[in-house]
Image (cartoon, helix red, strand yellow):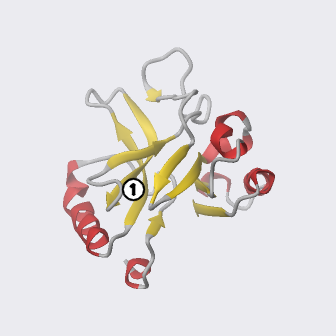
Amino acid sequence: MRELANGAQVVILPESISGSSRRSQQALWQRVSDAARQRGATILVGEESWNPARTSFRNALVGYGMEHDHGAVAVSSKVPMPVGDWKFGLEEGAETDIFGNDLVELHGRRVAFSMCYEDFLLWPHRGLLGGNAALMVSATNQWPSSGTSAEIAQDRSRAALARLAGVPLLTAKNR
């Protein structure tokens, strides 16, 4: 909320920071949404957004405030982490959207999003690498790999993607 009070138009929190979507969180996020809307801002929060049957989920950034509201999925992972989240051939686990768009219009700017594992891949970033983005945002949960060579490799990979596309990089990660 401090960032909103300081005039931020967009606040992005890391992948999976709020855990799974739950009714018990609705009152909290409603207050956040109201505060963002009053300031003309948007807050994107990393969350596992489950389908109604709770058999699979989308590794997503859900929105509160002006542009995306009431926990609607703003962008979701196109390629979740294989085996850990994405379970090949099974209905449970993270959903994939392999040919999904990496670009989202956010407060008048085209923003390319990368979720966790996608930081290591080129092909999910068609919009970014095609020159259609003004900014790259990476949302990641690095607490399992904090301080390891895997974290360093991911940091370098996402920075290289942004440099290759010639756009600034904003990273939201928890460690």
Which residue corresponds to mark 1?
Answer: 18
Report the residue at 55% width, 45% height from top: 103
Whether residue 1 appears in this view of the structure is yes
> Where on the picture, by quarter, is residue 65?
bottom left
Report the residue at 43% width, 71% height from top: 9
Between 154 and 162, the residue placed more toward the observer is 162
Q: Position of residue 147 (x, y in %)?
A: 73, 62
- Residue with the most extreme bottom position: 6
- Residue with the most extreme top position: 89
Whether residue 174 appears in this view of the structure is no
Q: Which quadrant of the figure contains the N terminus?
A: bottom left
Q: Residues within 10 Å of mark 1 (few under 14, many from 20)?
A: some
Q: Is residue 22 left or right of residue 107?
A: left
Q: Position of residue 99 (x, y in %)?
A: 57, 27
112 up-or-down from 49: above or below: below
Q: Position of residue 122 (x, y in %)?
A: 74, 38
Q: Is residue 162 left or right of residue 107?
A: right
Between 57 and 109, the residue placed more toward the observer is 109
Report the residue at 80% width, 51% height from top: 164
- The amino acid pointed to by label 1 is Ser
137 up-or-down from 3: above or below: above
Q: Which quadrant of the figure contains the C terminus?
A: bottom right
> Where on the picture, by quarter, is residue 5?
bottom left
Number of numbered discs on residues = 1
Report the residue at 54% width, 24% height from top: 87
Q: Position of residue 155 (x, y in %)?
A: 74, 57
Q: Secondary structure at mark 1?
A: loop
153 up-or-down from 34: above or below: above
